[in-house]
């Protein structure tokens, strides 16, 4: 169906999202740090990244910037408990496709991930990939 990478420094959120998405037959990997996500993305293609904004080593905005340079077709859904209009605008300007506030409803995450997987599949098909 598609590949999703979860990037969040909160282990409970990573485990929850992994279980939620794998229960819908979506392939999921997860990492704790932004730097780990960047390294993984150098070797593995993901369709969707669920990305926390506030992390210790690299913040989500910097990780988003790097993802979009490395893999422009990868869609990124930003997640944060500390939402502000500036974060939202900045993330969307850099290429994030969606933005969710924690705590979030599981149904919302499933809906957004499925929409983004469909979007990426459509893009790849139109590009002959």
Image: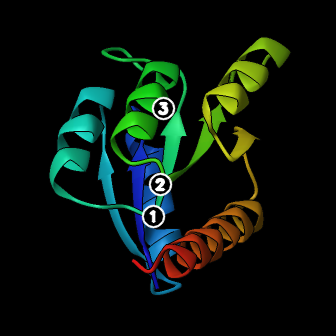
Of pointers 1 and 2, the one earlier in the residue sequence: 1
Do the residues under discs 1 and 2 have CB atoms within 8 angstroms? yes
Q: Which residue is mark 2?
A: 74
Q: Residue furthest front?
A: 127
Give residue 92's position: percent from left, percent from top: 71, 32
Q: Place residue 82 in its image quadrant.
A: top right
Q: Is residue 62 visible?
A: yes
Residue to which mark 3 is pinned: 64
* Residue holding disc 1: 47
Q: Is residue 29 above or below residue 104?
A: below
Left or right: 118 with respect to 30? right
Residue 98 percent location from the top left of the image: 72, 46
Q: Name the one closer to the observer, 51 or 47.
A: 47
How far apart marks 1 and 2 lie (CA) works out to 5 Å
The mark nearer the N terminus, 3 or 2, is: 3
Binning the other alpha carbons within 10 Å of mark 3 as few (below 14), some (14 to 19) or many (20 upward) gives many
Q: Residue at x 54, y 78 (%)?
A: 121
Question: Is 48 above or below relative to 107?
Answer: above
Which residue occupies 64% across, 70% down?
A: 119
Q: Of residues 43 and 106, which is closer to you in this image?
A: 43
Q: Quick one: label 1, few (<14), some, or many (20+) residues within 10 Å?
A: many
């Amino acid at each position: 169906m598609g590949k999703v990478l979860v990037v969040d420094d909160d282990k409970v959120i990573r485990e929850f999202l992994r279980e939620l998405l794998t229960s819908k037959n979506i392939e999921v990997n997860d990492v704790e740090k932004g730097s780990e996500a960047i390294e993984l993305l150098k070797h593995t293609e993901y369709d969707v990244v669920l990305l926390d904004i506030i992390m210790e080593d690299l913040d989500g905005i910097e990780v988003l910037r790097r993802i979009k340079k490395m893999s422009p077709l990868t869609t990124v859904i930003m997640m944060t408990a500390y939402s502000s209009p500036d974060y939202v605008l900045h993330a969307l300007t850099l290429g994030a496709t969606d933005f969710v506030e924690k705590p979030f409803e599981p149904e919302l995450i499933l809906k957004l991930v499925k929409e983004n997987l469909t979007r990426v599949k459509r893009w790849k098909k139109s590009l002959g990939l």
